[in-house]
Amino acid sequence: MIINDKITLQDWELTETFVRASGPGGQNVNKVSSAVELRFEAERSPNLPDAVKRRLKRLAGRRWTNDGAVVIFVQETRHQARNREIARERLAELVKAACEVPKRRLKTKPTYGSVRRRLEGKKVRGAVKKLRGKVEE
């Protein structure tokens, strides 16, 4: 499976199992295993650089298992082949997202005018709240 010009996932890294899906299925609901569980052994993959693996682990979230695999479960359609395609597309998108290096955030200071406006607004609110007290005669 080709992700980009540098990363290609081998067949041995991917494992597909087909299970029965929940939801509507008509007469075939208890006979056909249409849901797909795609398992990608990301931690053992020689094709992924370490930085990409770390970002993939963060992006995958709870889909990342303790043994370093990404598990994608799809049961959107009643067709096994279509669910398989969707699972592979999702995995490819996840790995592509992990390949992008996030931009470093530059610290910035608020402008003098914005600080002044914020403090002025706080003074106005405080004055309004001060006027809410009991009326003294």
Image (spheres, grey):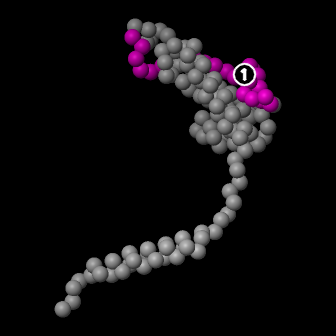
Q: Secondary structure at mark 1?
A: loop
Which residue is nearer to you in this view: 5 or 40? 5
Q: Which residues are magenta?
A: 1-26
Q: Amino acid at mark 1?
A: Met
Q: Residue at x 44, y 75 (%)?
A: 122
Quarter-of-image position of residue 115 = bottom right
Which residue is depicted at the point 29% across and 81% down?
A: 131
Farthest residue to the front: give it: 113
User: Which one is nearer the viewer's eye here, 76 or 35?
Assistant: 76
Can residue 137 be seen in the rendering of this structure? yes
> Residue 35, percent across and down?
53, 19
Quadrant into which the N terminus falls? top right
Above/below status of 113 relative to 59:
below
Q: Where in the figure is residue 54, as x and y percent of width and height?
A: 72, 42
Q: Position of residue 13 (x, y in %)?
A: 73, 24
Res 96 → quadrant: top right
Please give the name of the residue rendered at 38% of the width and 75% of the height, measured from the top-left corner: 125
Q: How many marks?
A: 1
Q: Residue at x 39, y 11 (%)?
A: 26
Read off the residue under disc 1.
1
Can residue 20 be seen in this snapshot? no
Q: Position of residue 61 (x, y in %)?
A: 60, 40
Determine the main secondary structure of the stretch shown in magenta: loop
